[in-house]
Image (cartoon, rainbow, N blue to C red):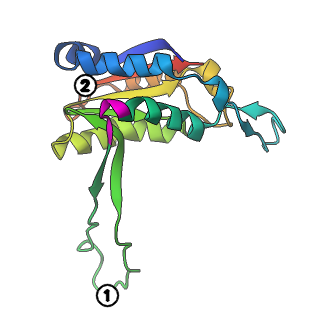
Amino acid sequence: MKIAGEFSFNKGATYLAKYHQALLDEVNEAIARVDAAPCKTKRSREKTMPGKVLYSPAALNRCFKAELHPKAWANCKVPCEYPTGFYKPGYKATPLSKGAFRDMDFVKNKLGLEIQFGKYAFMVYNVCAKMTIFHKLGHINAGIEIVPIKRFADQMSTGVSYFEQFVWDLQHRGVSDIDIPVLIIGIDA
């Protein structure tokens, strides 16, 4: 795979260069080592492209995991105890599931890494909510979000979001006082 674009959200590139350059180098090397060709295994059942062979997000994620786990990048999972004290008096709630959690794909030395080949909402959630939560909990101080560029996303299932769209929205949203430094990396096969 190759890096096709980078967007520094809340001075993410500057922060990573100063505090996490070695980790950023590991991520860049992992991207370069991932061979996307064997991941083109998903046969589409969509009306707009029946039978077309597409890149499998699950297979791509396995490739990244195979590159990053040996370098001590690990999943970070935090348990969630959902509040029930906000229900109206007399409301009979369904019992909340035990074992609820939030997780980040990879964390190493306070740097969070998410790889997202899903719908647009997940990209926004990762950067504007999840990374902020994991920062507040003390797990990370900055993040990297790896996403496909448009050309690569077009070779996946319909609805996969892409780098250019995400960057436009982040530019127009602006930075909030709770946002952490994040480098958005757009990749192509």
Quarter of the picture containing the N terminus is top right
**Residue 71 lies in the magenta stretch:** yes
Is label 1 or label 2 in front? Answer: 2
The kind of residue on which mark 1 rests is: Gly
Tell me whether the residue at label 1 lies in contact with that at label 2, contact meaning CB atoms closer than 8 angstroms.
no
Residue 24: horizontal and vertical position, in percent? Answer: 31, 19
Does residue 7 appear in this view?
A: yes
Residue 167: name its quadrant.
top left
Residue 112: name its quadrant.
top left
Span shown in magenta: 70-74
**Label 2, on which residue?**
181
Question: Which residue is depicted at the point 35% across and 64% down?
Answer: 100
| Secondary element at image label 1 | loop
Residue 160: horizontal and vertical position, in percent? Answer: 60, 34
Name the N-terminal-most of marks 1 and 2.
1
Question: Which residue is depicted at the point 21% across and 36% down?
Answer: 140
| Secondary element at image label 2 | loop
**Label 1, on which residue?**
90
Q: CA distance from mark 1 to mark 2?
A: 44 Å
